[in-house]
Image (cartoon, helix red, strand yellow):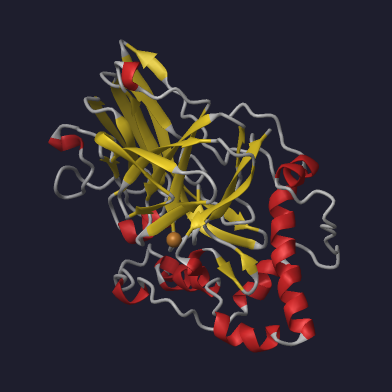
């Protein structure tokens, strides 16, 4: 978004903690935080690991497919129990506080609204009235948080993939190139398409094999916040990053809310870990708004778990579900977003401050080692 960068001083000022002595020791390098976290004991929360499909038999699929990433994601779910006794000693609680503070410092120091966290538009060319997009499936190393790089599967090298944003009624042609070591396909999740464009191998098309390209073409009919993702070996491919926003703006915009910012949050969990737009706290980015702004947030859950997204201090007005406008919008402070679901909410930034914004399954957000995973903030500046 076109927002001026927020200095750490301003963030602290607006957060009401300027001058509160937020001195952070420079005694450890950032990677120490996740390193500590990975030493945490077994997580308390059951995860989809047991229900995950067995390792695929094909040799092209690395054994990292499910178990390893799941384990990584869960190492953050540092249980309170083992940490508690240590915290009761002076050095234990001081260490705990220091780790919490250090994560916040990395988050603040990393604020950069232009770093791509809030989406990269997919450019297109126009051919005879058709908008032509190209997506290339690639395996890349992806840094999700300080010291943690994962083997991701991506569209055009980024997680989530670039945002496709068009207008209802547009005709699109999307050419997909597969440079990965396994076959794939693309499903246009929530988008009304002809059956043969639905992207399900052996049902509506052959898989797009390594080295091949495949062309999808359709005219969009239903506006709203939709998604695109792999529909082949999906537990691995989607959870590792073959995901993206597919936003169709209505042809008639007269009922669209007027907002000063439009933010998409793609949620994911196993695979690359507990992430918002492909990043885990402290590598997430805050939404930065001005007092009185109205902002739109589009949640898209590409993970395998439910994530109740909780915003402190500012209510969320839910205006649409899966791209369909709600006949009766409703307010909430915690919005449960299940796998596959999309919700659009409007937030009236009526109170200045730095408001925590996180998944409220606490094992997805905060441990004895500080905040991690699905955590960010809405910063309302005066
Ligand atoms: Cu969650």
Q: How many discs mark residues in the rendered view? A: 0
Q: Residue, x 70% and y 86% (percent of image)? A: 88
Between residues 189 and 89, which one lies in front from this camera angle?
89
Task: Reply above or below: 54 against 289.
Answer: below
Quarter of the image with the C terminus in it: top right
Quarter of the image with the N terminus in it: top right
User: Which residue ends up furthest to the top in the rendered image?
Assistant: 128
Task: Reply above or below: 305 against 134.
Answer: below
Q: Position of residue 242 (x, y in %)?
A: 40, 48
Q: Position of residue 148 (x, y in %)?
A: 62, 62
- On screen, residue 47 versus residue 366, left or right, reads left
Q: Residue, x 37% and y 60% (percent of image)? A: 236
Q: Position of residue 159 (x, y in %)?
A: 49, 46
Q: Position of residue 167 (x, y in %)?
A: 33, 20
For the question of whether residue 212 can be seen, the reply is no
For the question of whether residue 327 can be seen, the reply is yes
- On screen, residue 18 versus residue 154, left or right, reads right
Task: Reply above or below: 62 against 92.
Answer: above
Using the rendered view, name the quadrant where residue 48 is placed.
bottom left
Between residues 181 and 154, which one lies in front from this camera angle?
154
Quadrant location of ligand 1? bottom left
Between residues 199 and 372, which one lies in front from this camera angle?
372
Q: Residue, x 56% and y 35% (percent of image)? A: 350
Q: Residue, x 70% and y 57% (percent of image)? A: 104
- On screen, residue 257 versus residue 231, left or right, reads right
């Amino acid at each position: 978004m076109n927002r001026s960068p927020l200095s750490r001083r301003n963030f602290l000022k607006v957060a009401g903690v300027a001058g509160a002595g937020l001195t952070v020791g420079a005694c450890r390098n950032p990677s120490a935080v996740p390193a500590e976290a990975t030493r945490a004991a077994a997580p308390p929360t059951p995860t989809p690991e047991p229900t995950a499909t067995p390792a695929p038999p094909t040799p092209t699929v690395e054994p990292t497919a499910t178990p390893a990433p799941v384990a990584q994601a869960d190492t953050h779910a540092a249980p309170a129990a083992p940490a508690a006794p240590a915290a009761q000693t002076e050095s234990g609680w001081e260490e705990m506080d220091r780790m919490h503070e250090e994560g916040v410092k990395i988050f603040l120091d990393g604020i950069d609204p232009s770093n791509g966290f809030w989406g990269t538009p997919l450019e297109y060319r126009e051919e005879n009235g058709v908008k032509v997009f190209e997506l290339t499936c690639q395996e890349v190393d992806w840094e999700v948080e300080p010291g943690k790089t994962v083997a991701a599967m991506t569209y055009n090298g980024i997680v989530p993939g670039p945002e496709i944003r068009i207008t209802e009624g547009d005709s699109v042609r999307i050419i997909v190139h597969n440079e990965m070591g396994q076959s794939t396909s693309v499903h246009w999740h929530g988008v009304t398409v002809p059956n043969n464009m639905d992207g399900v191998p052996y049902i509506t098309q052959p898989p797009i094999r390594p080295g091949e390209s495949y062309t999808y073409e359709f005219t969009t009919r239903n506006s709203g916040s939709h998604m695109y993702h792999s529909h082949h070996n999906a537990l691995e491919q989607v959870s590792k990053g073959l995901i993206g926003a597919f936003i169709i703006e209505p042809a008639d915009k007269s009922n669209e809310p007027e907002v000063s910012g439009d933010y998409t949050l793609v949620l994911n969990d196993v695979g690359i870990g507990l992430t918002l737009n492909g990043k885990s706290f402290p590598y997430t980015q805050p939404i930065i708004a001005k007092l009185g702004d109205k902002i739109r947030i589009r949640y898209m859950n590409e993970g395998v778990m439910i994530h109740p997204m909780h915003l402190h201090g500012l209510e969320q007005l839910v205006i649409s579900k899966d791209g369909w406008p709600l006949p009766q919008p409703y307010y909430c402070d915690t919005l449960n977003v299940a796998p596959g679901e999309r919700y659009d909410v409007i937030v009236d930034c009526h109170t200045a401050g730095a408001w925590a914004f996180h998944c409220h399954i606490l094992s997805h957000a905060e441990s004895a080692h500080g905040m991690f995973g699905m955590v960010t903030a809405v910063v309302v500046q005066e």
